[in-house]
Amino acid sequence: MRDLFEPREAVQIYSLLVLVMGVSPVLAPLLGGQILQWFPWRTIFWVIATLGAMGLTGSLMRLKETHRAERKPLILGKVLRTYGDLLRDRAFLGYVLTGGMAMAGMFAYIVGSPYVFIEYFHVTTERFGLFFGVNALGLVLAAQLNARLVRHFSSDAIIRKVLAVQVTSGLVLLAGAWTGFLQLSGVAVLLFVYVASVGCLFPNITSMAMAPHGARAGSASALIGVLQFSLAAASAALIGTTRSGAAIPVAVLIGVCSVSAAVLYWTMIHSARAQAGNRVPAR
């Protein structure tokens, strides 16, 4: 995407990518449930292996190289220096960590939602699938809304507004869960708002982080994935260790992640632009 599209166009393409990613949480449990009804549980792994083989075959047959720069030998020292340069780029790291904290909050929801809905609010497994599907739909719709918003507003303007929505929903969720004021409907609405906002945030975060790094897009993309999914994995593991049948652990982590994302954005991106004399593109 970085090779083929300018930042503003890339945001729209990343929004389409979120559409594909958002559909997966809806279809996967439905497909898995049907497989388990009719076949032994080991069939799940055969299906995963088959899908992986199909993906590999498709990449070999259909995907062509889009990077136009001169090919260079793969030398570990140069690769590590490239990663070091990216980590020293305050704006790049700021965007990546902002997105990483938002993703950590979403993974807190993904891992913790069964505890919240099924154990705490005593929602049936069938209805839980409905809640999960609605939130995935919100993620998809928000990403498509973002594709329209980016035609009229800069990515940074959208990021700032989305972070404000995340902080508000996260803190209200935390306060409501802590005091016991929020019931099922309130928790469900706030989680929907938070998850949907991630669909608006990620296309802009990814595009802005990648924009100045066309010559090393592969390294930048790899580092984005490692850092963001490391934060997400840590969040998921933290929720998993609590194993609490209450909403408080999920609410605390989402609240902390939303505030942390906003603080990281304002301290790292704003200061980086001030130091660089607004050299970071703000398309």
Image (spheres, rainbow, N blue to C red):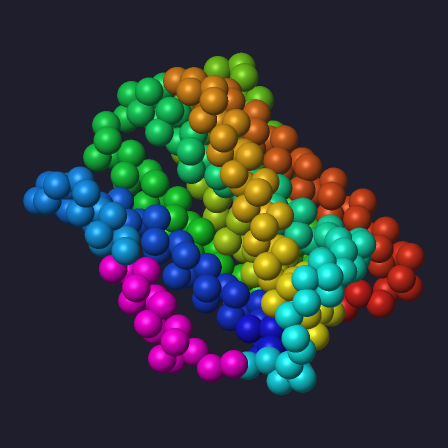
As for residue 231 lying within the magenta part, the answer is no
Decide if residue 43 is in sight here.
yes
Q: Observer-nearest residue: 45 or 121?
A: 45
Q: Residue at x 76, y 56 (%)?
A: 84
Main SS category, magenta section: helix
Residue 248's spot in the image, x, y percent?
Answer: 50, 20
Decide if residue 148 is in sight here.
no
Residue 163 to residue 202: above or below: above
Q: Observer-nearest residue: 255 or 234?
A: 234
Instruction: Tell whether 253 sits left or right of 63.
Output: right
Instruction: Tell whether 185 sits left or right of 207.
Output: left
Residue 178's spot in the image, x, y percent?
Answer: 54, 17
Q: Residue at x 64, y 64 (%)?
A: 219
Residue 232's spot in the image, x, y percent?
Answer: 54, 41
The outermost residue toward the left is: 38
Residue 112's spot in the image, x, y percent?
Answer: 43, 29
Q: Quadrant of the N terminus?
A: bottom right
Q: Quadrant of the C terminus?
A: bottom right
Q: Residue at x 55, y 34 (%)?
A: 234
The magenta region covers 50-65
The outermost residue toward the top is: 179
Residue 38 to residue 54: above or below: above
